[in-house]
Image (cartoon, grey):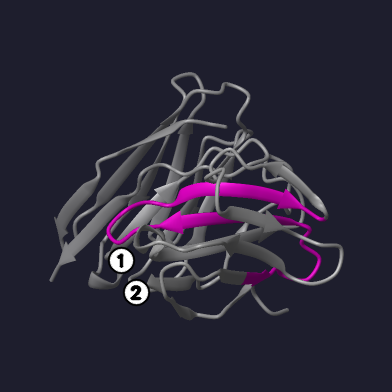
Amino acid sequence: GENVEQHPSTLSVQEGDSAVIKCTYSDSASNYFPWYKQELGKGPQLIIDIRSNVGEKKDQRIAVTLNKTAKHFSLHITETQPEDSAVYFCAAPRGDMRFGAGTRLTVKP
Amino acid sequence: NAGVMQNPRHLVRRRGQEARLRCSPMKGHSHVYWYRQLPEEGLKFMVYLQKENIIDESGMPKERFSAEFPKEGPSILRIQQVVRGDSAAYFCASSPRAVQGAMNTEAFFGQGTRLTVV
């Protein structure tokens, strides 16, 4: 299965600041990169994804960028709010779905 | 279209008993993935199934754990002779086909089953 490394493991930001989480993958044939958000006590929720035919995708305050040459992709959250506090997981699936270790984001009001 | 349904949401078992966790995928989804999550930890892949087939079980312990996804009915994760270390949240996800670059292959998760072994 795909091995995905995710950094940082924890991230604390002030409300209104931006947050960036980065994932690195090893299989150059990977072409789909989803991000999931998991709130306390709930199942992970797909929040944004990107396919390899584009370099960036935005959805309101969240965006994902992809650098296929360097084999990494990043989640960007702008104007963070307390409700963005959660654990975020990335994946680079090739049929199966293995996730990075997760990033615990805390947004301080 | 109902989401991925897992039941029960909470399950308490005594050491040595069997635990059966059910996952009903979204309508039209024939691929199911099971994960285990310990408190404050990540999603550990266990097994990937397609209808009536196990595609990848490399993340599942070889003893006491088994999974199936029959032609009819939900996917079942079965843990025999549970031990305290099996206490965790177990999540399943489903997708209409193998998750990869094609459109409409996104995977969606259920709310999980929290297993407590006493």
The amino acid beneath tag 1 is: Asp
Residues in magenta? Answer: B22-51
| Residue sticking out furthest to the front | B16
Q: Residue at x 43, y 66 (%)?
A: B89
Q: Residue A100: percent from the left, percent from the top?
A: 41, 42
Quick one: SS at disc 2?
A: loop
**Mark 1 secondary-structure assignment:** helix
Instruction: Work out which quarter of the rendered image holds the N terminus of chain B and state it.
Output: bottom right
Q: In which chain is the residue bearing label 1?
A: A
Question: Magenta segment: does it hold B94?
Answer: no
Label 2 marks a residue whose chain is B
Dot label at residue A84: 1
Q: CA distance from mark 2 to mark 1?
A: 34 Å
Q: Amino acid at mark 2?
A: Val
Instruction: Tell me whether marks 2 and 1 sit on the same chain.
Output: no
Q: Kindly report which numbered mark, 2 or 1, lies closer to the viewer in this rendering.
A: 2
Q: Is residue A62 left or right of residue A79?
A: right
State whether residue B5 is above or below residue B99.
Answer: below
Residue, disc 2: B118
Instruction: Please rate how many residues cluster around mark 2, counting C-alpha atoms within 10 Å: few if below 14, some from 14 to 19, many from 20.
Output: few
Residue drawn at x 39%, y 64% is B88
**Residue A67 seen in this snapshot:** yes
The residue at 24%/52% (across/down) is A18
Residue B29 position (above or below residue A42) = above
